[in-house]
Amino acid sequence: MGWYIAAGIAGLLVAAAVVMMVFFKLTAGRRDGWRKPEEQLCGAGPRRALFLYQPSNGGHNAAQAQALAGFLAGMGYAVTVNYPSPQLDYDPAEYDLLVFSSPVYIGETAKPLRDYLAGSRFTGKPVLLYVTGLLKEQPELTALEALVPPGNQVSAIKVKSTETGRLLDFARQALA
């Protein structure tokens, strides 16, 4: 009789594991989906900033990205905000500041942003990187930093989607 219970529990655990794997696969697939470029301009300052971010599945980082774009505009930047995509034809060399952001799911950043950075060539730029995630560990941020070409001044942080004030403080300090 005891083996029936053990087999039943094992079956439930296997079923739960399969459901979790399907959920995580769908979550990562949605996070890694290419989005159609939707350029937004913020500010009209004399300096130019390119800000590419991958939206989170629930769009939780969109308000945070808009807050950062508004903050940069207040610092005198004309900010171009968009999603990373192979369809983009921005030349990073034409910008005074580059900002890249991704949500983190299952310890990974978004593939569209990783691919964009891996295919980009720029040097001598201040670069702000930030990722949004719940855990304090930052291996995904380190992996994203490694994709920025050498010869750039990179400042990076991991924040929760609710830590907009912390993100803006980080940007203020990084650009001081």
Image (cartoon, helix red, strand yellow):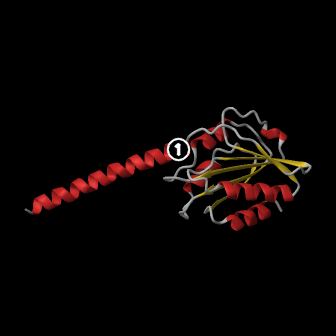
Check the image and report above or below for 159 versus 38: below
- Residue occupying the point 79% across, 36% down: 91
Is the residue marked by circle 1 packed among few (<14), some (14-19), or many (20+) residues within 10 Å? some
Which percent across, then down, holds residue 11? 22, 53
Whether residue 57 appears in this view of the structure is: yes
Quarter of the image with the N terminus is: bottom left
The front one of 107 and 77 is 77
Q: Residue at x 60, y 38 (%)?
A: 34
Query: SS class of the residue under badge 1?
Result: helix
Residue at 76 percent across and 40 percent down: it is 122
Q: For residue 74, what is the image quadrant?
A: bottom right
Residue 102 spot, x, y in % from top left? 62, 50
- Is residue 156 at least partly visible in the picture? no
Task: Please say if 116 is above or below 5.
Answer: above
Residue that numbered label 1 is attached to: 30
As drawn, is 9 to the left or to the right of 145? left
114 over 126 or under it: above or below = above
Q: How many numbered dots are placed on residues in this image?
A: 1
As drawn, the residue found furthest toward the right would be 46
Residue lying at the far left of the rendered structure: 1
* Whole-percent x, y for residue 69 in the image: 77, 54
Q: Position of residue 124 (x, y in %)?
A: 80, 45
